[in-house]
Amino acid sequence: MLEDFLNAKPLFYDEIDYTRMPRVYERIQKSFKLPKVIHIVGTNGKGTTGRFLATALYKLGFNTAHYTSPHIITFNERIWLNGKNVSMENLEQTHETLLKILTKEEAQSLSYFEYTTLLAMLFFSNRSDFIVLEAGLGGEHDATAVFANDLTLVTPIDRDHEAFLGDDIETIAQTKLNAIQKKVIIAKQKHSSVYDILQTIVNEKKIEAYTLDSLLQQSDYKKIETIAKHECLAPYLIDNLSLAIAALRSFDIAYSCSSFYDAKLFGRLTYLSENIIVDVGHNVLAAQSIVASLPNKHYILIYNSYKDKNYKAILTILKPIIKSVELIDVYNNRIAESSYLQNCLDELGIEWKRFQKIQEEESYLVFGSFSVVEAFLRSYHG
C-alpha cells in the first residue's frame, strides 16, 4: 500500500542529502515523458498561484497537472489533474510501477517528499500538456528542481525554514532563485535585495526575466479586477492571480475572466462557515497578508506553532485582529512546547485558553500551519 510505504518514512529531517534526488532521477529519467513544466518557487503563495494557473490552463483546453504540498486531510490533495485530485487507486498503480523502476535501496532511501514528487511526475507523464510544479521548502536543492522546466514563477520571498535555507533574506533568496533554468517571472517583492540577486543570476545564466508590469497589459488589470470581485479575493490572492495571468501571457495564451473562476485552493482564507475562517499560513509574511485581508474585525485565533517559527513576531502582527487565542492540541514532534507559547502570549498581553469547542456567536480564525488546520478540521467535522 502506498500510504503504508510513505508512512514508514519520516516527514521531517534534521539533515537532508541534497545529492540523492538528482542522482536517482538521472538514472531513471528515461521513464519520464514530461510536457511543458512551470516551476513555482518562493516563500508564500505558491499553492494558490499554481491552482489559479492550472485551473485556467485546464479550462482553456489543455491537459493540466498541478503538484502541491503538503496535504491537509488526504494524501491525494497533492496530485491534481484536469480539475480534480487523482484517485488513490490510480496512485497505487503508479506506486507499483515506480517501485519497479527504482532499486529497492533507492525506494527506501528517498524521503517522503522526494518519493511523492517522483510518483506525481510519473503519473503526469504522457497525460498532460502542462505540469504546474510547486517546490517544497527550497529552491535549487528541492526535489522538484531536478526536472527540466520551461518557466519559473517566483512568489514573494521572505524568511522561513531558516534551518535549511539560511538565516537572512539574501541567502534564502539565493537558494530559491538558483532553481531558475530558462525563463522567470518574478512577483512583487518585499525585499529589494531579491531583485538584485535575481539580476546577478540572470546575467550569469543568460535567463529571460520578466516582472509583472512588463507582461501585463491594461486589459489584464481590468480582468484581474473583475475576477477578484467575482471571487471575493483577498489582496494577497489577487497578487497570486496576477502572477498566474503573467504566466499565460508569457506563453501567448489568451484567456477570459471565467478561466479563473472557482480556482481557489482550500485552506487559503477559506470560510468554513460565516464565523470560521481557516488559513494554512504559518510565517511572518502570511500573518501580514492575513491582517491586510481581514481589517476592522476581531477574531478568536485558534492557534499552535512549529517550534522553528518566529511565533512571537507572528502573534505580534496578528494582535490587532485578535480578540483572544485558543491553543489547539497538535500531535507532531515539530510543535512548539506549550509552555513557551503560553509565556509568549502572556508577554504580549493576549488572553488565551485551551481550545474546546466553537461558540456560534463568536468569529474564529484558524491559523498556524497545515497541521493546525488539519487538527481543527478533524475536531470540527467530528
Image (spheres, helix red, strand yellow):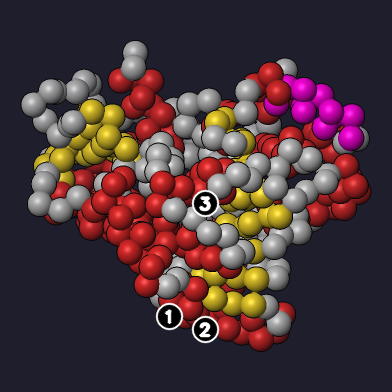
The amino acid on which the numbered mark 3 sits, given as a three-letter code, is Leu
Q: Position of residue 207 (x, y in %)?
A: 67, 78
Front-most of residues 87 and 313: 87
Question: Residue 95: within the magenta?
Answer: yes
Residue 176 in sight from this viewpoint: no
Determine which residue is flagged by label 3.
53
Give me the residue at 90% from left, 47% from top: 30
Magenta segment's dominant SS is: helix
Contact between marks 1 and 2 (CB within 8 A): the answer is yes
**Which tag, 3 or 2, sits closer to the chain's start?**
3
Contact between marks 1 and 3 (CB within 8 A): the answer is no
Front-most of residues 372 and 198: 198
> What span is in magenta?
91-101
Mark 1 element type: helix
Question: Residue 160: within the magenta?
Answer: no
**1 or 3: mark nearer the eye:** 3
Q: Quadrant of residue 202?
A: bottom right
Determine which residue is flagged by label 1.
192
Residue 377 in sight from this viewpoint: yes
Determine which residue is flagged by label 2.
196
**3 or 2: mark nearer the eye:** 3
Is 310 placed above or below 203 here?
above
Q: Position of residue 372 (x, y in %)?
A: 38, 34
Front-most of residues 95 and 49: 49
